[in-house]
């Protein structure tokens, strides 16, 4: 995909504050959440929750999008585990560093940032994740959760989260090898990253909520990226869970 092509896609799919009320929606399309072949032979699957292989079962079972958080701070160890679960290096082969998530060609065409709001042992502000050294780089002490929430359509739960993980896309890493197909791989790859983060959060007694609704230019500015060679792509708020008596069911 040429630079002009992916920039056209980004522009046409971007949310703009002055145009949000007129954004195009395809309301006449049929919407179904699953597909079935009614005439096919159906084989019921059995699952043994007692098997050691199923020890991750409760974590997957309990994962829900969480928008209400305890005011108890996250621990720096929680952040470290979530970063490892979503981006940790697990092996090296030649010049490639393999991580906990798959990526086309092991190119990993994205960067991870963390807006720290309430984390024990970390000053509030915006950090960048240094994958190779497994470290956080403190890059903006003026970044505020209120400003981030403003960029993300005023979603107030962002203010209450202990931290917000933000991912940017760097398409040149993929386009140089895969051409136009590489932009699709970038979008697929970032889904793997966010899912691993949410599973890692659940394993640490936390909860999170993915965020795809944001004003693109505003979030790019918040992250101090140019919006072309590197651009905001996805985010997830994370916090400690409320006591069960204070929680309400979620459907995501």
Image: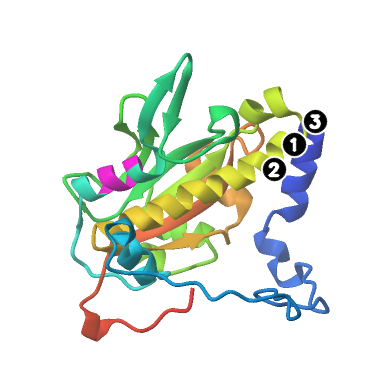
Q: Residues within 10 Å of mark 2 (few under 14, many from 20)?
A: some
Q: Which residue is mark 3?
A: 2
Q: CA distance from mark 2 to mark 1?
A: 6 Å
Crowding near the residue tagged with mark 3, few <14, some 14–19, many ≥20 C-alpha atoms within 10 Å = few
Looking at the rendered structure, the secondary structure element under dot 2 is helix
What residue did someone put label 2 on? Answer: 184
Quarter of image, res 238? bottom left
Rendered residue at 37%/35% (across/down): 129
Callout 1 secondary element: helix
Contact, mark 2 vs mark 1 (Cβ under 8 Å): yes
Is residue 199 at all visible to an observer of this figure?
A: yes
Chief secondary structure of the magenta span? Answer: helix
Q: Which mark is residue 196?
A: none
Q: Is residue 82 magenta?
A: yes
Left of 122 or right of it: where is 236? right
Residue 179 in magenta stretch: no
Colouring rule applied to residues:
rainbow
Q: Is residue 245 above or below residue 240?
A: below
| Range covered by the magenta-colored residues | 79-84
């Amino acid at each position: 995909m040429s630079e002009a092509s992916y920039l056209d896609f980004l522009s046409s799919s971007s949310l703009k504050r002055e145009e949000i009320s007129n954004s195009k929606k395809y309301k006449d399309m049929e919407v179904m959440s699953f597909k079935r072949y009614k005439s096919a032979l159906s084989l019921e699957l059995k699952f043994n929750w007692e098997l050691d292989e199923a020890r991750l079962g409760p974590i997957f079972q309990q994962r829900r999008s969480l928008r209400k958080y305890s005011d108890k701070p996250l621990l720096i160890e929680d952040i470290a585990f979530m970063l490892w679960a979503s981006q940790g290096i697990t092996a090296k082969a030649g010049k490639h560093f393999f991580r906990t998530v798959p990526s086309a060609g092991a190119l990993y065409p994205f960067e991870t940032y963390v807006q720290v709001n309430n984390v024990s042992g970390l000053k509030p502000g915006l950090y960048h994740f240094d994958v190779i050294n497994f470290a956080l780089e403190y890059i903006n002490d003026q970044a505020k959760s209120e400003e981030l929430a403003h960029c993300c359509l005023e979603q107030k739960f962002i203010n209450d989260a202990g931290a917000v993980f933000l991912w940017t896309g760097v398409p040149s890493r993929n386009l140089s090898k895969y051409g136009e197909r590489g932009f699709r791989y970038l979008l697929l790859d970032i889904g793997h990253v966010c899912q691993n983060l949410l599973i890692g959060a659940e394993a640490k007694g936390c909860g999170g909520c993915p965020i795809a609704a944001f004003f693109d230019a505003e979030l790019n500015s918040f992250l101090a990226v140019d919006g072309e060679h590197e651009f905001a792509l996805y985010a997830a708020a994370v916090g400690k869970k409320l006591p069960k008596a204070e929680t309400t069911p979620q459907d995501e």
